C-alpha cells in the first residue's frame, strides 16, 4: 500500500508540472525577434524593434488596410471642415489605458504633439498645422494653416506612427526618453520579466476593445488571443533555426533567406509571407562630391545595375524576388509605376562608361563602404563593387561593421577625409511606397538623409503631390515625379524582395500586416 | 604571507588603472557612434546630434575621461547608454549564467583532463598515450562554435535529449538549469580539457622520472598510490597554474559559447555592447573581468604552499 501511495505521489509530482508546462505552451507564443529591445520609447528612436514593441502595447488613431487606405482604429471617425483646413476626430467609446484610466481626446492631443516634434512625416504635418486642441472628452481638432491632403494618411502610417499614450506621459519633452509603458494596446508589457538582451514578456490586455471589423493589414480588430508573448533575442541564426526545428520557439521573425528552401521541406514549419510590399534594396550615392554630384554619374551607376544579379546573391530563392522592379515607390503598391525606368531595365556598361566620362570621372578612387556584419548588405555591396570594376571604376572597398557605417555615413567630409561615395541599405513598407514619406527619396539637399540627395525641383513636385487630396488627381503628378526621379536618381533601387517569417505548423491566424504583429494569432 | 597578499592586491590597482585608460581610449578612438545606432536607421542627422549631446558624447575626450574616472573612483561603473541602467546591476544580472557555465566547464575539464594526462604519462609512447594526445589535439583545434553546432544537431535535434538554447536559473528549476548547461559545458570544456590534459601529461612525465618516484616504486608501493599520491601531488603546481591562466581562454570561449547557445551571460552582454558601442558596459565588463582574472590568479598563487610546502611567501 505504501509503495502504491508513493508511486501515485511520484506520478502526480511528474505529471502536474508537465501539464502546467503544456498549458503554458498552448497559451504562450515564443518569438525570436530580429533585434534586442532596449529603448521603449517609439518617439525617441526609429528602431524597428521599438516600433514593433509599441504596436503591442499602444494603439493608433488610424491604420492602413491591405489596399493602403487609412481606416479608423482608435478613432470612431472624422469630419473634414472649413474647406479641408480642419479635421475633427472623435475617439471610440470604452477605450482604456493599461492603468484603467479612460483614453481621452487630451491624451491623443498630447501624444500627437510629441510625435510631431520628432517624426519626419509628423514634422511635415506640423509645418502646416496651426493648432491641435481637444474640444471635449472624446473629440479633438487638427487645424491647418494651408491645405494638406495627407492628414489621415499620416496618422495611419505604419512605421513610427503616432502611438497614443496617457497625457501625463505624452507631456514628456520629445527629446527625453519615456520610460513608462502604459498604452491602450492589445498587450501589456511585463516589466518585471524584461531581461534586456534575452527576453521581453507581454501579457494579454483583458480590457482591450478590438474593432468589430476583421483584421486587415494594420487595420481592423486586433484580438489578443495568446495569454502571453515572449520575445527571445537569439542573435545566432543557426541556433534560432535549431530552436524552431526543436519546437522550443513558435515564431521566427526574420529567418535567413538562404534557409527558406530547407525550412519549407520541414512539415513542422510553415513559411508565411506577411509582407505584401516587401523590401527595396538601394544604392545610395553621396550627392555632395564628384562624380556622384553629377546626375550623369548616378545614371551611369543605374546602367550598371542588373537587379536580378543582386537578388540572386542577396535572396537566392526566386520566389521571394522580382527580376526587375522599376518603381521607386514599390512594385505592388498604390503608387507603383515604372515610368522613366525603361532605359535601366538591362545593364549597359558602354553607356555607363560614356556617362562617367561626361560627368568628369577620370579614374579617381571611389570609396564604397562594406558592412561585413550585415549578410544581405555585404552581399549586395560585393555585387556593386564587381559591376563598378567591370566598368573600369577604381574602387576602394572599405570593410567595417554596421555601426561604424551608420556613423560614417553621416559624415559630410570628402571621401578622402573620412567620407564616402557609396553605400548600400534597404527600406520597405507603406512609408517607402509614397513620395512624401520615402525618406531616401527625400531630395531636400541638407535636410535629406545621408548622401544628401539634392533636387529642389523634384521636392517641389512631391509637395504638389502631398497637397492634392484626390487620389486620381495625384496620379499624373506621381508619374512626373517618377520620370524626374529616374533622371535625378536620389538613389538607385537594386531590387525588391520579401522577407517571410517562419512559424511552427500549429501557429495560426497570422495577419499579413507588412511586419510581424501578434494579435489574432493562436496555437492549435 | 599577509604582507604578500597586501602587496599583490595593491599591485592590481595600477594594473586596473592601465586597463581602464587603454579601454577608454581604444573605444573612443575606434570608429562607430552609439547615437547613430540609438536613433535608428531612419533617423535624421539632427536626431543623431541631439542624442549625442544628451549622452555627453560631444564633449572633449579628456572631459569624458575625467567624468568617468571620477565615477569609477566612487565605485560607480556608470549607466548603460541604451538602457539608462547602472552597468554594475546589468553585470550582476548576467553573472549567474556565466559563473555557472565557467564552474561546470572547469569541473568537467578537470575531471576528464587530469586522469587522461596521468594515464597518458603513465603509458607514455603506447597507443593509449597516442590516442589521448590525438583526442586532445582535435579538441583543441576544432573551433568552439563547430563543436557547439555539432552537439546541437546530434543531441538536441536528432536525439531530442537536451534543449537547443537558453538558460534557466537554478532557483527557478534545478533540473532544467542542469539540462540547459550540459551542451554549453561540453562545448567549452573540451578545449579546456585538451589544454589541461597536455599540461598534466607533460608535468607527470617529468615527475615520473624523478628519483623519489623510483624510490617509491622500489619500496613496493602500489602503482596507483605512486601515481596519485606521490607523482600527481608533486606535479600539481604547474597544473593549478594552468587552470588559472586558462581562465583567459575560458573567458574568450564563454563569449562564443553563450552566443551559440543563446545564454544571457556576461559574454553576450559584452558582444552586444561592443556591436552597439555601449561604452560604459564595455568598460565596466572589461574592468570586472580584469579584476576577477587578477584575483583568481592571486588565489592560485596562495594555494601553492598547500600543494608544495617548499614554497613560502
Image (cartoon, rainbow, N blue to C red):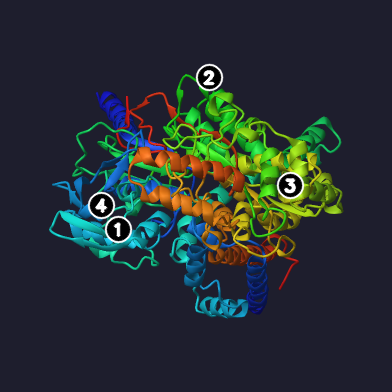
**Image position of A498 with respect to A449: above or below:** above
Tell me what residue is drawn at x 31 percent, y 33 percent.
A216
Q: CA distance from mark 1 to mark 4?
A: 19 Å
For disc 1, the chain is A
- Structural crowding at the residue carrying mark 4, measured as other residues with C-alpha within 10 Å and reported as few (<14), some (14–19) or many (≥20): some
Please report whichever mark, 1 or 4, sits nearer to the chain's N-terminal start. Answer: 4
Give the structural element (helix, strand or loop) at label 4.
helix
- Structural crowding at the residue carrying mark 1, measured as other residues with C-alpha within 10 Å and reported as few (<14), some (14–19) or many (≥20): many
Tell me what residue is drawn at x 19 percent, y 54 percent.
A103
Check disc 2 and report the residue beneath it: A265
Task: Name the front one of labels 1 and 4.
Answer: 4
Q: Position of residue A339 (x, y in %)?
A: 54, 35
Residue A156 in sight in this render: yes
Check disc 3 and report the residue beneath it: B195
Quarter occupied by the C terminus of chain A: top left
Task: Name the front one of labels 3 and 4.
Answer: 4
Check disc 1 and report the residue beneath it: A112
Tag on residue A84? 4
CB atoms at circles 2 and 1 under 8 Å apart? Answer: no
Give the structural element (helix, strand or loop) at label 3.
helix
Q: Position of residue A388 (x, y in %)?
A: 75, 43
Give the structural element (helix, strand or loop) at label 2.
loop
Amino acid at each position: 500500500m505504501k509503495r502504491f501511495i508513493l508511486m501515485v505521489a511520484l506520478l502526480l509530482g511528474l505529471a502536474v508540472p508537465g501539464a502546467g508546462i503544456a498549458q503554458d505552451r498552448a497559451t504562450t507564443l515564443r518569438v525570436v525577434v530580429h533585434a534586442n529591445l532596449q529603448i521603449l520609447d517609439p518617439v525617441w528612436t526609429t528602431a524597428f524593434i521599438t516600433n514593433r514593441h509599441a504596436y503591442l502595447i499602444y494603439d493608433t488613431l488610424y491604420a492602413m488596410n491591405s489596399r493602403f487606405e487609412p481606416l479608423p482604429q482608435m478613432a470612431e471617425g472624422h469630419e473634414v471642415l472649413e474647406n479641408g483646413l480642419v479635421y475633427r476626430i472623435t475617439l471610440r467609446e470604452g477605450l482604456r489605458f493599461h492603468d484603467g484610466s479612460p483614453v481621452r481626446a487630451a491624451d491623443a492631443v498630447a501624444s500627437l504633439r510629441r510625435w510631431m516634434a520628432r517624426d519626419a512625416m509628423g514634422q511635415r504635418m506640423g509645418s502646416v498645422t496651426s493648432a491641435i486642441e481637444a474640444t471635449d472628452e472624446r473629440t479633438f481638432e487638427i487645424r491647418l494653416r494651408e491645405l494638406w491632403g495627407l492628414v489621415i494618411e499620416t496618422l495611419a502610417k505604419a512605421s513610427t506612427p503616432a502611438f497614443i499614450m496617457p497625457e501625463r506621459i505624452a507631456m514628456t519633452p520629445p527629446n527625453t526618453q519615456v520610460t513608462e509603458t502604459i498604452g491602450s494596446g492589445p498587450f501589456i508589457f511585463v516589466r518585471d520579466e524584461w531581461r534586456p538582451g534575452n527576453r521581453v514578456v507581454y501579457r494579454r490586455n483583458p480590457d482591450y476593445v478590438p474593432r468589430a471589423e476583421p483584421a486587415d493589414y494594420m487595420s481592423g480588430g486586433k484580438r489578443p488571443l495568446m495569454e502571453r508573448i515572449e520575445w527571445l533575442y537569439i542573435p545566432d541564426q543557426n541556433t534560432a533555426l535549431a530552436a524552431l526545428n526543436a519546437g522550443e520557439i513558435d515564431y521566427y521573425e526574420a529567418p535567413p533567406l538562404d534557409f527558406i528552401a530547407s525550412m519549407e521541406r520541414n512539415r513542422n514549419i510553415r513559411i508565411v509571407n506577411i509582407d505584401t510590399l516587401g523590401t527595396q534594396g538601394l544604392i545610395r550615392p553621396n550627392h555632395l562630391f564628384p562624380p556622384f554630384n553629377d546626375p550623369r554619374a548616378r545614371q551611369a551607376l543605374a546602367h550598371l545595375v542588373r537587379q536580378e544579379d543582386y537578388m540572386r546573391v542577396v535572396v537566392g530563392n526566386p520566389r521571394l524576388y522580382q527580376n526587375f522592379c522599376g518603381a521607386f515607390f514599390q512594385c505592388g503598391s498604390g503608387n507603383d509605376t515604372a515610368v522613366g525606368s525603361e532605359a535601366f531595365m538591362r545593364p549597359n556598361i558602354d553607356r555607363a562608361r560614356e556617362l562617367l566620362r561626361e560627368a568628369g570621372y577620370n579614374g579617381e578612387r571611389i570609396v564604397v563602404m562594406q558592412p561585413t556584419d550585415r549578410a544581405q548588405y555585404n552581399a549586395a555591396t560585393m555585387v556593386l563593387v564587381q559591376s563598378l570594376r567591370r566598368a573600369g571604376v577604381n574602387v576602394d572597398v572599405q570593410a567595417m561593421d554596421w555601426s561604424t557605417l551608420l556613423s560614417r555615413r553621416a559624415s559630410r567630409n570628402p571621401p578622402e577625409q573620412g567620407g564616402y561615395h557609396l553605400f548600400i541599405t534597404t527600406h520597405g513598407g507603406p512609408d517607402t511606397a509614397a513620395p512624401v514619406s520615402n525618406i531616401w527619396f527625400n531630395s531636400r539637399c541638407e535636410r535629406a538623409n545621408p548622401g544628401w540627395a539634392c533636387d529642389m525641383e523634384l521636392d517641389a513636385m512631391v509637395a504638389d503631390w502631398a497637397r492634392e487630396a484626390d487620389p486620381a488627381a495625384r496620379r499624373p503628378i506621381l508619374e512626373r515625379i517618377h520620370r524626374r526621379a529616374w533622371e535625378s536618381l536620389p538613389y538607385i533601387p537594386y531590387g525588391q524582395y520579401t522577407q517571410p517569417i517562419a512559424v511552427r505548423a500549429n501557429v495560426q491566424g497570422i495577419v499579413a500586416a507588412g511586419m510581424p504583429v501578434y494579435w489574432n494569432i493562436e496555437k492549435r | 604571507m599577509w604582507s604578500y597578499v597586501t602587496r599583490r592586491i595593491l599591485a592590481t590597482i595600477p594594473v586596473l588603472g592601465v586597463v581602464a585608460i587603454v579601454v577608454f581610449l581604444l573605444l573612443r578612438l575606434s570608429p562607430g557612434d552609439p547615437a547613430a545606432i540609438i536613433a535608428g536607421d531612419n533617423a535624421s542627422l539632427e536626431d543623431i546630434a541631439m542624442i549625442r549631446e544628451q549622452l555627453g558624447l560631444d564633449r572633449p575626450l579628456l572631459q569624458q575621461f575625467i567624468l568617468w574616472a571620477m565615477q569609477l573612483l566612487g565605485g560607480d561603473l556608470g549607466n548603460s547608454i541604451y538602457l539608462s541602467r547602472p552597468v554594475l546591476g546589468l553585470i550582476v544580472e548576467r553573472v549567474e549564467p556565466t559563473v555557472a557555465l565557467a564552474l561546470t566547464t572547469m569541473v568537467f575539464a578537470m575531471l576528464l583532463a587530469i586522469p587522461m594526462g596521468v594515464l597518458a604519462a603513465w603509458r607514455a609512447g603506447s597507443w593509449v598515450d597516442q590516442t589521448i594526445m590525438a583526442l586532445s589535439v582535435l579538441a583543441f583545434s576544432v573551433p568552439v562554435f563547430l563543436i557547439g553546432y555539432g552537439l546541437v544537431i546530434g543531441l538536441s535535434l536528432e536525439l531530442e535529449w537536451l534543449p537547443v538554447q537558453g538558460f534557466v536559473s537554478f532557483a527557478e528549476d534545478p533540473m532544467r538549469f542542469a539540462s540547459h548547461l550540459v551542451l554549453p559545458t561540453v562545448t567549452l570544456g573540451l578545449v579546456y580539457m585538451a589544454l589541461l590534459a597536455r599540461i598534466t601529461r607533460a608535468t607527470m612525465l617529468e615527475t615520473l622520472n624523478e628519483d623519489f618516484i623510483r624510490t617509491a616504486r622500489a619500496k613496493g608501493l602500489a602503482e596507483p598510490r605512486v601515481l596519485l599520491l606521490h607523482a600527481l601531488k608533486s606535479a600539481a603546481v604547474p597544473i593549478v597554474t594552468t587552470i588559472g591562466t586558462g581562465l583567459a581562454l575560458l573567458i574568450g570561449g564563454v563569449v562564443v559559447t553563450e552566443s551559440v547557445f543563446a545564454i544571457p551571460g556576461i559574454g553576450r552582454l559584452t558582444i552586444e555592447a561592443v556591436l552597439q558601442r555601449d561604452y560604459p558596459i564595455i568598460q565596466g565588463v572589461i574592468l570586472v573581468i580584469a579584476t576577477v582574472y587578477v584575483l583568481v590568479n592571486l588565489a592560485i598563487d596562495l594555494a601553492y604552499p598547500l600543494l608544495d610546502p617548499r614554497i613560502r611567501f
